[in-house]
Image (spheres, coloured by chain):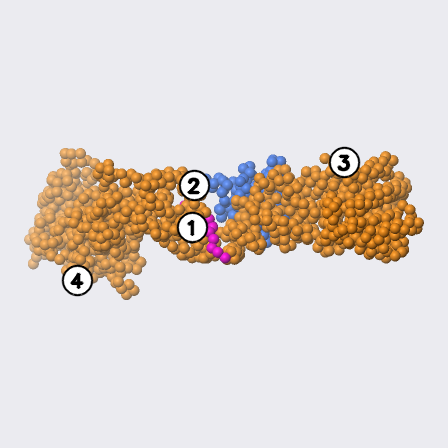
Amino acid sequence: MASTACFVIVSKNDIPIYEAEVGSAPKKEDLSYHHQFILHAALDVVQDLAWTTNAMFLKSVDRFNDLVVSVYVTAGHTRFMLLHDSRSEDGIKSFFQEVHELYIKIFLNPLYLPGSRITSSHFDTKVRALARKYL
Amino acid sequence: MDPLRSYLGRLLLEEITPVVMVLSTPLAEATCRKNGLSFVDMLSPFSLFKKIDVPVRTASEVPYRLQMFKIRMVYASDVRKEDCEVADERIKPVVSEANEKALPDLLSDPPQVEDVLGKPEAELCPLWIKKFNRELMRTLSFSEHETFDHPVACLLVVSSMDKEPVNKFVDLFNTNQLPSLLNEGIMDPQILKHYLVLHDQQEGPQDIAVNVLAEMRSTLGLNDCKLLCINSSTEAGGSNAENSWLPYKALGLNNHDGSCFLSVDDLNEIKDFMQDFVSNHIIPYMEQKIRVLNQQVAQTRKGFRNQIKNLWWRKRDDVPEASNGPMYTFTSIESQIRVLGDFAFMLRDYELALSNYRLLATDYKLDKAWKRFAGVQEMSGLCYFILDQSRKDAEYCMENAFSTYLRIGSSGQRNATRCGLWWAEMLKTRGQYREASNVYFRVSNEEPSLHSAVLLEQAACCYLLSNPPMLRKYGFHLILAGNSYYMSDQKQHAVRVYRNALFVYKQNPWSYINNHVHFNVGRWYGVLGILDVAIKHLLEVIACSHQSLTTQNMFLTDFFHYVQSMGKKFDVYKLQLPVFNMSSLKVIYEDHRTYASDADVSVSESTWQELEEELIPSSSIVRTNWLDTQPMRKYKDSCICVAGEAVKLNVELKNPLQIPVAVSGISLICQLSTTLDALSSDVSGLDLGGGEDKVNTEPSISMFETDGDKFTLSKLDIVLGGGESKRVQLDVTPKVEGILKLVGIRWTLSESVVGYQYFEFDAQKKIKKGKRGPRRSLNNSLVVIKGLPKLTGSIDRMPTKAFAGDLKLLTLNLRNHSEYAVKGIKMKLSSPRFLIPGDSLDIGLEFPDCLKRHMQSESSVVSSKTMKENFKSLLFAFPQDIEIQAGAALSWPIWFHAATPGNISLYISLYYEMGSSSDIKYRTLRMHFNLEVLPSLNVSFSISTSSSRLREYIVRMDVMNKTPSESFVLHQLSCVGGKWAVSALPSCSSINSVGTVSENQAVSYFFKIKDCEADSCKEAESGSCTSDMALCPGSSTDLFDIARSPLADFHYQERYRQGKVAQGPCSLLDFVLISKAVGNSSKPTPDFELLSHHTCHCSSLSQNPIWWLMEGPRTISHDFSKSYCEVNLQLVIHNSEAHKILVRVVTFDVMPEKSQTVHPHDSNSAQGGWYDVSLENDVKAISSSKSTHQEKQSSKSISPYVWCSLSCAQTELQPDSCARVPLKVCIFAPGTYNFSNYELQWKVHPSEGPHVDENEKLLSGGGLGHPFYVTVLQSV
């Protein structure tokens, strides 16, 4: 498992709708804003890159020092962004794919307003379990 | 675009130029000092030639012309590699100088997206950044591995005042004073020497100098000696001299102390000297050197043979790896190639330079001289760039150089930086901004914080310039730059870059980013002393609920720190702490509807309206004529409140932080305009213009405070704990008539910050709300009308919790606070099952004694007021003569009965009319109570018919105590209506002793009830036939009269309610069980005294339409020795049905076997109170004791008796009548007999009418006889 991993789902309006620190490193207050900055800046790259390929998994799109940003773009242009320092691309891909399935389940919920914050604790638990499994 | 015209091209032309080393005597320097300049300073403005137009011929035969040319004049003492720290110190002022310029900028508004995107590159990258870049590159001057900084020529300067000037020249070029580069053999000490005699015109005539020059020419050579005369101007700083300096000032010539003796002639002479020096000496020398070196290189290195040799030689001679490769002296071929390349570069023969650099690169690579290799790569990259040949090659070379420099560690770090800067400039020239910013970012990692800050800022600019602009990257890199600036103590710069990034993060939902940016900007503004802006930014972060406790604390502490250093209270519009939940806003005002408590307001208006339907006069009644309606119409659109009565505003506030927050002085901002003329026009205007109005009034918050004499405001201080939300109620009491406008809320946070917020009234919303009823609308303007009487009301001791059946006498207290009387009071209650108003007589009575039966005469009082068939709600009019005078109070009894368990809401609306005429004719007082009724006793009855008596029933009462801790004493059981008499069973007269039911206990009681009316027996008169029965000892004397008003009324309600649920075929009778609470040791005084449980519509379990009974003697003495015994019996059959019934009685002698097994009552009587007890065994026992021959008979299974007379009889019974069928039995032996061997079969004849409906199944049926025991004794 990666020591640092910050997973964020960004809606198509560039609003983070789900955030989770899934790394094994103890969470630090000052790092969380740092991670947000990196991920937020990486959106610029994703914006360009997303239209150049048919694949949903864009692999690593941006890096900051030793931290890498991997991105997965859904058909609705919701972006799953993972800031990580591990190298296993396959694991990240599987992680993204499984999270996508979870996300679709959330999306199918008639009470969920697309683009609003995901507050489901079930989703959170599942995502963290997936992170432990793949990252 | 011509690469040379680009910024990088110009940079290279200016920076990579021949260096002239200057050696001067102290006296010569002193001469220049008179003008406040050093010698180098004096000459340097003239070292740039914009149009030198010199023909140059290098290695190739074709000459070309140089246009612009520049040389660098450097003192010999400066020709050395600078110390890193010293160099960095020199850079610092460049940054801090820009600092001061940035300060005024910081006070203006931060830039917006449109501004930034429209800016040209030059503005984004201000001049000081370029200066900084240049200074950063210059720190690398005179490095060993590059030769373009190595002096090309040497200028030796001697003053004409010096003694023995020729010897001085020799001394000057003394080897031990020369720079280490020359001494250590890195560069060729045999360089071009030029000799200059400096003559000060003020010191004496020119002749001395001319003599010196002649002497020099003879010894040092004819062409290499020059004379320069300066300071010819006599007066210091003449006006003409000022002017003549002007063109050169821009080139960096600044004399500091104003005194200047240089005349125009002097300057021209200097210029001429420099022109001659460059065009006649330096350039030809370089040309020559290039040609010589080129020839050498061609000889040793060019050609196939040389290449092979070179390779073989290098392979064999494997040099040990040093950090920067082997030492190369100026004589080595590698150094010579490098010099050749650099010279060619400086003379713009880039082709030649490039070919040499490439040649050299392979050599250095083989030698593993990495630093030199990187340097060469760097230069070839630049050559590629200027030649504009292969972009790929250029980039490859630069990248190669960059990474190689980085690889060799700290010694190459700064080189890498320079290489990066060049590389980035190169990419920028080609429009590859994104790559450029990447390079800047990589460079910034290698530099100390100050440098990296500037570099990061440049990286950010590149992101902005890239197409499409990458704003988020721009923001991020600016933030990084800001952090670096802050770390290197450049706060102004830090604030400046953060400010520039603000627009990227404006309205940003990425919470942590937002907080970080605003907090840092705010804090740094605070450090800089710009407190108002600091507070403005800190305000954005103080309501951060997602941060940890420590962070919140830090934010808040800083905020208050700056607020306090501001030294005054200040107003903040829409302060985020605490958060006022504007959707929870509710205005409570009372027009004709008044409320007993605030909780009553939350009840929906429709509930009240439904309740008040019959109570209040319909609107047409109020308007007696059209004139009357005028004032009402005027206020129709707006809400009305009454002067002197508080308008309340409910709002929820929430503390988003985990830290307790003290909020004080929460009050409303109101406006009261009294101009009644403007009223009508204003009312409509206010509704529509609410939005704009707010904008207009926003800045002037203080103006609302002046209205103190028109209304009073309540102030509220609270402390909100972490994450707590509280509902507060704010009052405004208007004192005069007019229009009251609720504008907003103001509050003080921690005694230092005043927050205020205006209500936002959306016009569109208002239309929607208008439909929902005026109470809920957030209309902010209220019409204040003249004071009106107002009643306040409450019910004393109204329980919130009660046990089911609880009966209480409560008091309704009404008080008139105004100075007018009210009259015509009416009251409507929502559920008369729970509350029934008493009458005025009840008020002084003592409960519960008043319910007791005092005298027999009073028992037949029938209350008439409840006989209205309205069970949903109860309208009660107070007597007409009741009027509540000003300041008076009225008490009225109200009976309370907790009818059923559950949560119950009770609504009471009180109507009253004004004593005096006023705008409003009447008002209503609305009261609302929520009640929780707990289950107490569960009472159920089951009634079964008695088989021994007609019209008598056995009643089983099951009482179960459902409470966990209370015990009850059963006091009384009553049957409602005079028809029934209840009494204890004779066999269990001891029932009175078990009157207490303790918690969770279930008790069953058996009673007998009797129909008094039908029987009309004498018992009724004897008094033993009463409808009440005392259940506990000693209570027989004080029984409650259930026919009196409250109990009877409540019973009436219960009967109605339960009638809805009951669905038996016929309802028989109602029971009322009255119980009392027992004060046990733990609870000496229970808060309830009397409970009454009403069970209505109880009916017999028996389903049979007929009811039969054997009558006859029970004991007979007969002398069997004479004859058999004949017993005359009568079967009494009663028809309780409303139809005619045909009954057939069949007797049979043989005992049917099945009679024991098939029990007609089996299914029904399982729960009932009546069971058949078989006495068969007893019969045998008795008979066996009497005589033995009886046994024989019975063993033969012959019936011991024989029915005589008829075996079958048929009668027809009229409805509700009896018939008697005579029967006769013959008995042959003494004993006890059960005459039950008969069967009844009946058939209902439905009377003429459509009554043949639901009880089809009961139309016919049959039943076996009841046991009837007769004991026959042998008479003696």
Whether residue B308 sits left or right of residue B800 in the image: it is: right
Q: CA distance from mark 4 to mark 2?
A: 80 Å
Sequence-first tag of 1 and 4:
1
Q: Which residue is mark 3?
A: B389
Image quadrant in which you'd find residue B1254: top left
On the image, the x and y values in percent for residue A2 come to 61, 50
Question: Is residue B803 visible to the viewer in this orientation of the structure?
Answer: no
Name the mark on residue B692.
2
**Callouts 1 and 2 on one subunit:** yes
Residue designated by label 1: B702
Quadrant in the picture for residue B990:
bottom left
Q: Which residues are magenta?
A: B567-584
Q: Which chain letter matches label 3?
A: B
Q: Report, in whole angstroms, how far the alpha carbon at label 4 lies from the one at label 3.
A: 125 Å
- Asked whether A37 falls inside the magenta stretch, the response is no
Q: Quadrant of the C terminus of chain B?
A: bottom left
Which badge, 3 or 2, is on the more N-terminal residue?
Answer: 3
Q: Which numbered disc, 3 or 2, marks the residue closer to the eye?
A: 2
